[in-house]
Amino acid sequence: MRLHHVGIAVEDLEEAKARYGLLGFGVVAEGEVASQGVQVAMLKGQGEALVELLAPMGPETPVGRFLAKRGPGLHHLAFATPRIEEELARLEGEGARLLDPVPRPGFGGHRVAFLHPSFGLGVLWELVEEEGA
């Protein structure tokens, strides 16, 4: 798999976009994932990997609770795969605890699934289904 994006939890999406803009990262997509209560800005600089800025739509959302507990910063690493169900089964067989045993809709129309941070050595992992990954 290849690194698809790095997810960063932020309190103020506009401030974060401006800050990353200083490094040459521009917004390539924006929107929300209503089911997760999050506003998203996907940024791209040079190269392949993306930075995904995540701002909660309320304090009781997953990212809202993350910010309350840990503050802004690294939220997850996302890895691209063309066959998400196969990878979930393989990783579960290797001992991964699946937070999403069945892929769900994610940002940009991708199917996604998260793995518990204990398997990622303290980092939340996301699998993103993407053709040709």
Image: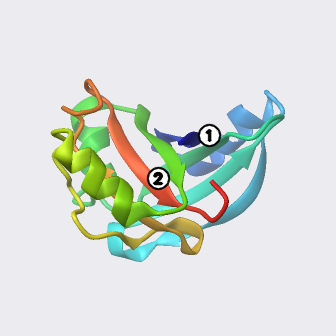
Mark 1 residue element: helix
Indicate the position of residue 65 as horizontal and vertical percent values.
23, 48
User: Can see residue 10?
Assistant: no
Who's the residue at 69% across and 32% down the image? 19
Q: Establish if 106 lies above or below 42.
A: below
User: Can see residue 98?
Assistant: yes
Indicate the position of residue 107 as horizontal and vertical percent values.
53, 67
Labelled pair 2, 1 in contact (Cβ < 8 Å): yes
In the image, taking residue 92 as reference, residue 50 lies left or right, namely right
Indicate the position of residue 119 as horizontal and vertical percent values.
22, 33
**Considering only order in the chain, which callout, 1 or 2, is on the residue closer to the N terminus?**
1
Q: CA distance from mark 2 to mark 1?
A: 9 Å
Identify the residue position indicated by label 1 in the image: 16
Q: Establish if 116 lies above or below 71.
A: below
In the image, taking residue 57 as reference, residue 51 lies left or right, namely right
At label 2, which amino acid type do we have? Ala
Identify the residue position indicated by label 2 in the image: 55
Mark 2 residue element: strand
At label 1, which amino acid type do we have? Ala
Who's the residue at 26% across and 57% down the image? 89
The answer to which of 21 and 80 lies nearer the viewer is 80
The answer to which of 21 and 48 lies nearer the viewer is 48
In the image, taking residue 21 as reference, residue 72 lies left or right, namely left
Who's the residue at 84% across and 34% down the image? 46
